[in-house]
């Protein structure tokens, strides 16, 4: 009984570590040298998501990261099926092309497995316009800021795109 109590107290006193990646993803992270440029940064929970994001029939992993040189935040997409990794965010672009900018604004993310979503469109002058229904073939990553909105990251068959949801 005493051993159990001591083991439990020691476990509680240790700082929480980053979630362990699947072995294939950790190998890919290491072999690509991503740790030289990026730190895993769980600025939203969980620290990574997994689903077949690119539709090749194999589970992929999306990892929250921060760029060491600038501190800007983004996502590294690792593809189990042999497709090259993708870096989303961690840049300085503040335009509507969210996947080139710093994703530091986001505080929630999750895998969305619905079959449709509504995308908010913009007028040529940059104002909010109509919405259109998007039919989804694959899981998406929903990225949001509490009480402000966000959007979704979706593989369109060629690349990851941003589907704007709300402002």
Image (cartoon, rainbow, N blue to C red):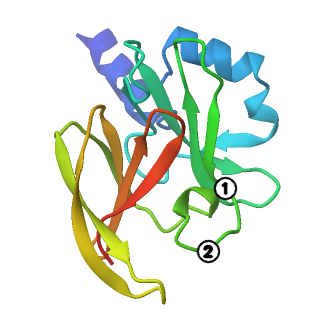
Q: Is residue 49 shown left or right of residue 118?
A: right
The relative height of residue 100 versus residue 15 in the rendered view (above or below) is below
Q: Is residue 132 shown left or right of residue 24?
A: left
Residue 116, position as x, y percentages in the image: 17, 46
Answer yes or no: do the residues labelled 1 and 2 have beta carbons within 8 Å?
Answer: no
Instruction: Tell me how far mark 1 sits from mark 2, CA to CA.
Output: 11 Å
Q: Nearer the viewer, mark 1 or mark 2?
A: 2
**Residue holding disc 2:** 94
**Residue holding disc 1:** 90
Crowdedness of circle 2 by 10 Å Cα count: few (<14), some, many (20+)? Answer: few
Identify which residue is drawn at 52% across, 14% down: 80
Identify which residue is drawn at 45% across, 35% down: 13
When asked about the image quadrant of residue 113, the answer is top left
At numbered mark 1, what does the secondary structure look like: helix, strand or loop? loop
Identify which residue is drawn at 49% across, 54% down: 43
Q: Choose between 15 and 156: the one closer to the eye.
A: 156
Mark seen at residue 80: none
Q: Quadrant of the C terminus?
A: bottom left
Q: Is residue 84 shown left or right of residue 80?
A: right
The relative height of residue 40 versus residue 148 in the rendered view (above or below) is above
When asked about the image quadrant of residue 87, the answer is top right
Identify which residue is drawn at 52% across, 36% down: 63
At numbered mark 2, what does the secondary structure look like: helix, strand or loop? loop
Crowdedness of circle 1 by 10 Å Cα count: few (<14), some, many (20+)? Answer: many
Outermost front residue: 124
Residue 149, position as x, y percentages in the image: 30, 70
């Amino acid at each position: 009984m005493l051993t159990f109590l001591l083991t439990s107290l020691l476990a509680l006193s240790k700082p929480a570590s980053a979630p362990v990646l699947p072995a294939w993803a950790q190998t890919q992270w290491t072999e690509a040298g991503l740790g030289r440029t990026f730190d895993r940064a769980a600025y939203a929970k969980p620290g990574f998501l997994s689903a077949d994001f690119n539709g090749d029939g194999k589970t992929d992993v999306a990892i929250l990261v921060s760029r060491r040189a600038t501190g800007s935040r983004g996502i590294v997409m690792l593809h189990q099926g042999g497709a090259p990794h993708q870096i989303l965010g961690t840049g300085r672009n503040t335009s509507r092309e969210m996947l080139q900018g710093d994703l530091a604004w986001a505080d929630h993310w999750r895998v969305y497995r619905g079959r449709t979503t509504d995308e908010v469109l913009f007028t040529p002058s940059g104002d909010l316009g109509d919405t259109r229904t998007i039919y989804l073939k694959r899981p998406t990553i929903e990225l949001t800021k509490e009480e402000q909105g966000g959007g979704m990251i979706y593989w369109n068959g060629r690349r990851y795109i941003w589907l704007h949801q709300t402002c």
